[in-house]
Image (cartoon, grey):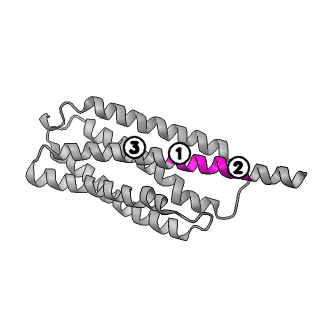
């Protein structure tokens, strides 16, 4: 199909990256699972860690949708539009989780990367489907590519942020333990 021709390498790279990063997130979660559990930690995980996996999964799903051998782009556009709408709804849930968790007070950067940017990206994805379905515009696939890359970068940022938070939290706990032992 002409509209998606030439995008194969892009989606192989982006989709493979998302899949690999999902695997790395599982490794990180496994490594920090041995740490002392703090009350409210699981609820904070649903606010901060789970959305990262969802974004990486969305990129992987989007790569699969766009790479499938469609006869017409309408089916792909419908699916990426549903992914965009689902992502927007999910971001409303993430917002609620971020507000109700009590272990960490989100800063502006947290709201930006965990709610605002993902919501906008999913909205672009939903909007590009509408644009493609009703105007058959070839530029809609560029918006889909931008959304895939944006979700990947947002996920990388959030994964790094979460990992460094746990490292510094662990350092703080270790420092307190060492002080208490002296």
Please state the horizontal and vertical placement of residue 60, each as a whole percent of the image: 38, 41
Magenta range is: 159-172
Q: Residue at x 27, y 42 (%)?
A: 145
Q: Residue at x 66, y 41 (%)?
A: 31
Residue 71: give its label: none
Please state the horizontal and vertical placement of residue 87, each as a whole percent of the image: 36, 57
Residue 120 lies in quadrant: bottom left
Q: Residue at x 40, y 33 (%)?
A: 16
Q: Quadrant of the N terminus?
A: top left
Cβ–Cβ under 8 Å for marks 1 and 3: no
Give the number of the mark in front: 1 or 3: 1
Please state the horizontal and vertical placement of residue 18, each as a whole percent of the image: 42, 39
How many numbered marks, from 0 up?
3
Please state the horizontal and vertical placement of residue 157, each as a whole percent of the image: 47, 47
Give the main secondary structure of the magenta stretch: helix
Q: Which residue is mark 2?
A: 170
Q: Which residue is mark 1?
A: 160
- At numbered mark 3, what does the secondary structure look like: helix, strand or loop? helix
Task: Please say whether residue 133 is one of the residues in the magenta stretch.
Answer: no
Residue 152: give its label: 3
Q: Name which of mark 2 and mark 1 comes first in the sequence.
A: 1
- At numbered mark 2, what does the secondary structure look like: helix, strand or loop? helix
Give the number of the mark in front: 2 or 3: 2
């Amino acid at each position: 199909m002409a509209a998606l021709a030439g995008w194969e390498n892009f989606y192989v790279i982006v989709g493979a990256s998302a899949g690999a990063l999902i695997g790395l997130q599982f490794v990180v979660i496994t490594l920090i699972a041995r740490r002392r559990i703090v009350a409210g930690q699981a609820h904070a995980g649903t606010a901060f860690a789970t959305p990262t996996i969802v974004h990486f999964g969305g990129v992987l799903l989007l790569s699969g949708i766009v790479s499938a051998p469609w006869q017409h782009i309408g089916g792909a556009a419908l699916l990426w539009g549903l992914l965009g709408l689902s992502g927007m709804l999910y971001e409303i849930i993430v917002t609620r989780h971020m507000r109700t968790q009590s272990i960490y007070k989100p800063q502006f950067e947290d709201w930006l990367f965990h709610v605002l940017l993902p919501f906008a990206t999913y909205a672009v994805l939903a909007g590009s489907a509408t644009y493609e379905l009703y105007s058959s515009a070839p530029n809609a696939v560029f918006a889909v590519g931008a959304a895939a890359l944006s979700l990947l970068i947002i996920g990388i940022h959030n994964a790094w942020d979460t990992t460094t938070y746990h490292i510094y939290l662990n350092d703080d706990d270790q420092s307190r333990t060492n002080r208490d032992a002296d």
